[in-house]
Image: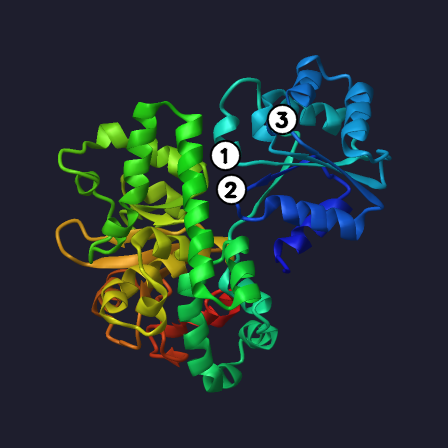
């Protein structure tokens, strides 16, 4: 299974200013596999140590930052000789040992020629606890579930991925039906590596759902493990409410929809936890399409998406027939799945920060706003081939300096003021131009 982040890892390895690497990402997105695969391909040997439930290793870091002693410990634990310039050292589940995270500062300062990477779940939360995070002494990369283009590669559709990458409208058009079917398949399978592998190996969506339910159970177990009962209850309630929020026509997150009587002050920290843990994506509202967009963000008004469209399906209880056969249940929820899909591709494949816009005193709303360079792109998402864009047209007239785009199942179409881009082609921003 190829991951596009491999190219970034190669760039990190070859950088003359390389620092120890922290690979961020939610649990089960493939961090450990990717680092091991990268090490096997590009280094003479890999010294891998796992800090989870390993008090002996933790004690070595707690004893101080004598690097020769620590490297001797890594050699003994991994069974691999550590040679700077030849060995790739992986410190996995580093959130279980905060002082191991701090040690990256000393690796950076004292043995910069040694390639060291750390991975672990809930890293962004751990950074704020215990010993200090080595600010300025590490490089960082983010790993997400497989995006749609990676999914095409993984399911033996690399030629179709190459067609998407080509940006050739004349090539994309004849394969529209095939892309549509693969897109619906991706809505169910999603991009969690284990889910994709299960589908490739079994061709059985029931097996995929069992994997997804296991991942969801693991997330909920993590929430209960890392937090007290009271805090866990708030977080679990917010997490489980995602399908209800996204299933509404107005997808703004409303605390009262979690349960009767829910108050924002009780759940704001829960939302922060979910986003820091990487299992949810917060999309804030902006008051106007100014540059930079973040300066106009209203953090009190937002949409909340899951990290993966397949997990959203599982969380929603949508079965395979609902999506593949397109029954009434899918028809009712397809708008939510399509917005989830678009949000996921903007973040994971396009490396963009999504926002949304809504009018203060009307029902007008733009599904997403993103900033690319000096351009602001208002984006309308259509689950089918509906080409009516009343809200987008009104927004474009109000803010003529923006670059309107509509993502739908229709083919490429320029309407002068706006360009339609097929949903399956949005992962390559060249296709937006």
Does the image show residue 278?
yes
Q: Is residue 230 left or right of residue 29?
A: left
Q: Which mark is residue 27?
A: 2
Residue 93 pos. (x, y %):
60, 33
Indicate the quadrant where residue 238 lies. Answer: top left
Q: Residues within 10 Å of mark 1 (few under 14, many from 20)?
A: many
Q: Earlier in the sequence, mark 3 or mark 1?
A: 3
Residue corresponding to mark 1? 122
Q: Are marks 3 and 2 in contact (CB under 8 Å)?
A: no
**Residue drawn at (33%, 26%) of the image:** 231
Q: Earlier in the sequence, mark 3 or mark 2?
A: 2
Report the mark closest to the observer, 1 or 2.
Answer: 2
Image side of residue 251 versus residue 432, left or right = left
Mark nearest the camera among 3 and 2 is: 2
Picture quadrant where residue 318 is located = bottom left
Instruction: Say which mark, if any, is on residue 101.
Output: 3
Is 148 rendered above or below residue 411?
above
- Dot 2 falls on a residue whose secondary structure is loop
The residue closer to the viewer here, 398 or 26, is 26
The structure residue drawn at horizontal position 40% and vertical position 53%, both measured from the top left corner, is 311
Mark 1 secondary-structure assignment: loop
């Amino acid at each position: 299974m190829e991951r596009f982040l491999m190219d970034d890892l190669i760039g990190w390895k070859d950088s003359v200013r390389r620092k120890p690497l922290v690979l961020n990402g939610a649990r089960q997105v493939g961090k450990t596999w990717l680092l091991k695969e990268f090490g096997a391909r590009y280094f003479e040997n890999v010294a891998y140590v796992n800090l989870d439930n390993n008090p002996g290793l933790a004690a070595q870091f707690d004893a101080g930052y004598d690097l020769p002693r620590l490297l001797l410990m890594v050699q003994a634990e991994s069974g691999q000789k550590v040679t700077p310039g030849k060995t790739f050292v992986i410190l996995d589940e580093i959130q279980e040992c905060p002082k191991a995270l701090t040690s990256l500062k000393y690796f950076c300062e004292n043995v910069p020629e040694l390639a060291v990477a750390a991975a672990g779940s809930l890293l962004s939360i751990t950074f704020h606890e215990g010993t200090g995070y080595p600010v300025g002494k590490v490089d960082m990369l983010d790993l997400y579930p497989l995006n749609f283009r990676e999914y095409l590669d993984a399911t033996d559709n690399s030629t179709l991925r190459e067609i998407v990458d080509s940006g050739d409208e004349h090539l994309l058009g004849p394969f529209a039906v095939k892309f549509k079917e693969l897109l619906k398949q991706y809505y169910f399978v999603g991009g969690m590596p284990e889910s994709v592998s299960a589908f490739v190996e079994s061709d059985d969506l029931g097996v995929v759902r069992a994997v997804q339910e296991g991942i969801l159970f693991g997330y909920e177990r993590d929430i209960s493990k890392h937090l007290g009962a009271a805090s866990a209850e708030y977080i679990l309630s917010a997490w489980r409410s995602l399908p209800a929020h996204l299933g509404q026509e107005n997808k703004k997150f409303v605390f009262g929809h979690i349960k009767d009587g829910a108050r924002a002050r009780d759940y704001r920290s829960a939302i922060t936890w979910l986003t820091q843990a990487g299992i949810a994506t917060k999309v804030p509202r902006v008051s106007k399409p100014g540059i930079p967009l973040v300066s106009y963000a209203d953090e009190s008004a937002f949409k909340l998406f899951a990290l993966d469209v397949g997990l959203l399906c599982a969380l929603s209880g949508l079965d395979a027939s609902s999506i593949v056969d397109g029954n009434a249940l899918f028809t009712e929820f397809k708008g939510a799945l399509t917005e989830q899909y678009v949000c996921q591709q903007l973040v994971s494949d396009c490396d963009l920060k999504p926002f949304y816009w809504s009018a203060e005193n009307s029902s007008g709303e733009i599904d997403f706003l993103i900033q690319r360079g000096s351009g602001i792109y208002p984006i309308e998402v259509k689950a089918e081939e509906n080409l009516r864009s009343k809200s987008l047209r009104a927004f474009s007239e109000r803010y003529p300096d923006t670059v309107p785009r509509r993502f739908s199942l229709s083919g490429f179409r320029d309407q002068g003021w706006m360009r339609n881009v097929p949903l399956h082609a949005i992962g390559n921003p060249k296709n937006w131009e």
